[in-house]
Amino acid sequence: MSYESRLELARLLFADFDVSVHGIVAQPFLLKSEVEQKVRKHIPDYFLLTAQGPVVVDVKPRRRLAQPDVAATFAWTQDVVESRGWRYEVWSEPPKQVLENIRFLAGFRRGWLFPPDLLNELRRADLDGVSLEKAPRSLPGHPEPRVRAAIHHLVWTHELHTDLAGPLRPSAVLRRSV
C-alpha cells in the first residue's frame, strides 16, 4: 500500500486495525470540477471500504487544516463525496500512545504465524479481567513468550481488548469481545 508521509502510514495502520475496514485503495481517483469559475482538482489519499459503506479519507497535519487553500479543498471534496452518499473524513495526528500501541500490535497481526491449537486454547481460556502479565500463565503447557505473542495477536484481531489509550504495561487488563 502506498503512502507519502508517516502520517499517511499511521492512517493505514489504523485502517488495518479497524475490523470494519474490508479494503483500502490509495489515491483512488481524481476529483475535477469547476468551483467559483475555477477548475479544481484533488486526489484524496484513501478510499476505505467499510461495513458501514465507503469512506473517502484525506490525511493532513492538524497545523495545516486552517490554511485557506486546504480548508477550501477539503470543504469542496466533502460536498462532492457526501453527494454520492459516502462518508468523508479528514484525518490528522492520532493520540500518540494509541498510535504507539497499534504500531506495536501490528507486529502480531499475521495469524498464520501462530499455532492454531494455541490460539484456540487462548480463545477458551478465561482471560476476561486478567492482566497482560498473568495471562500467559493461563496455558502452562506452552512457552510464555509464545503465549504472550499469541495474546497480542488476539488483541490485534479484537478477540481480546485492553485500553490502548495508556501504555501496554503488564498491569493492563484484558477483556473479552462481546
Image: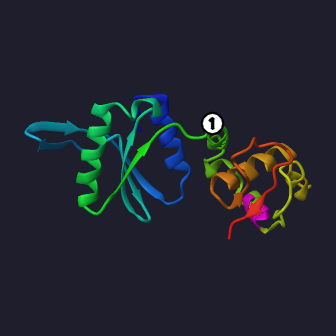
- The residues colored magenta run 119-123
Three-letter residue code for mark 1: Lys
- View extreme (left): residue: 37
Q: Nearer the viewer, residue 129 or 121?
A: 129
Q: Residue 144's spot in the image, x, y percent?
A: 86, 46
Image quadrant in which the N terminus is located: top left
Residue 22 included in the magenta stretch of the image: no
> Residue at 23% across / 38% down in the picture?
42
Residue bearing mark 1: 96
Q: Nearer the viewer, residue 90 or 108?
A: 90
Residue 100: name its quadrant.
top right
> Residue at 85% across / 44% down in the picture?
170
Q: Nearer the viewer, residue 75 or 28?
A: 75
Rendered image coloring scheme: rainbow
Q: Residue 127's spot in the image, x, y percent?
A: 82, 62
Residue 3: name its quadrant.
top left
Residue 122: name its quadrant.
bottom right
* Secondary structure category for the residue under label 1: helix
50 relative to 138 in the view: left or right = left
Q: Residue 111's spot in the image, x, y percent?
A: 63, 52
Q: Residue 90's spot in the image, x, y percent?
A: 40, 44
152 relative to 126 in the view: left or right = left
Position of residue 76 relative to residue 116, above or below, is above
> Residue at 48% across / 42% down in the picture?
12
- View extreme (bottom): residue: 178
**What is the chief secondary structure element of the magenta stretch?**
helix
